[in-house]
Every structure is written in structure tokens, then in C-alpha cells.
Image (cartoon, rainbow, N blue to C red):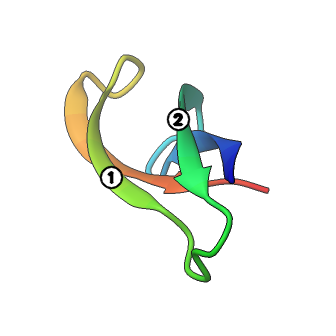
Amino acid sequence: MSKKVILACVDCGSRNYSTVSKETQTKRLELKKFCKTCTTQTLHRETK
């Protein structure tokens, strides 16, 4: 099974992306993505 998760920018906190994550994953998903607010590539983490 997979579940839909929202990714939020670490710097500004804006929620820019959504993706699909596996249910068995225990750690929060972290991806380096482009943030429209910061206008740079920053780390985005899975939110609750």
C-alpha cells in the first residue's frame, strides 16, 4: 500500500509538493526540491 504525503520547505515552511510514500516507511521522507517562495533548491520534509 502507499499513502499520499505533503512536502514542506524546511526554510520557509510553505507546502509546495505532494507525493506517494510507502506505508512501511518509518522515517519521514526528505527530498531536495525547488521552492517557489525561496526561489532556490531546498530540503523538503514530509508533514503530518
Residue found at the very far bottom of the displayed protein: 26
Rendered view: 13 above or below 34: below
Rendered view: 27 above or below 41: below
Residue found at the very far top of the displayed protein: 36
At which x and y percent is residue 2?
Answer: 65, 49
Rendered view: 30 above or below 14: below
The front one of 31 and 10 is: 31
Check disc 2 and report the residue beneath it.
19
Badge 2: how crowded within 10 Å, few (<14), some, or many (20+)?
few
Which comes before the other along the chain, label 1 or label 2?
A: 2
Corner quadrant of residue 8: top right
Q: Nearer the viewer, mark 1 or mark 2?
A: 2
Identify residue type, mark 2: Thr
Corner quadrant of residue 4: top right
Q: Residue at x 66, y 43 (%)?
A: 5
Q: Residue at x 50, y 56 (%)?
A: 45
Q: Secondary structure at mark 1?
A: strand
At which x and y percent is residue 1?
Answer: 69, 53
Q: In which quadrant is the C terminus drawn?
A: bottom right
Check disc 1 and report the residue beneath it.
31
Identify residue type, mark 1: Leu
Q: Are marks 1 and 2 in contact (CB under 8 Å)?
A: yes
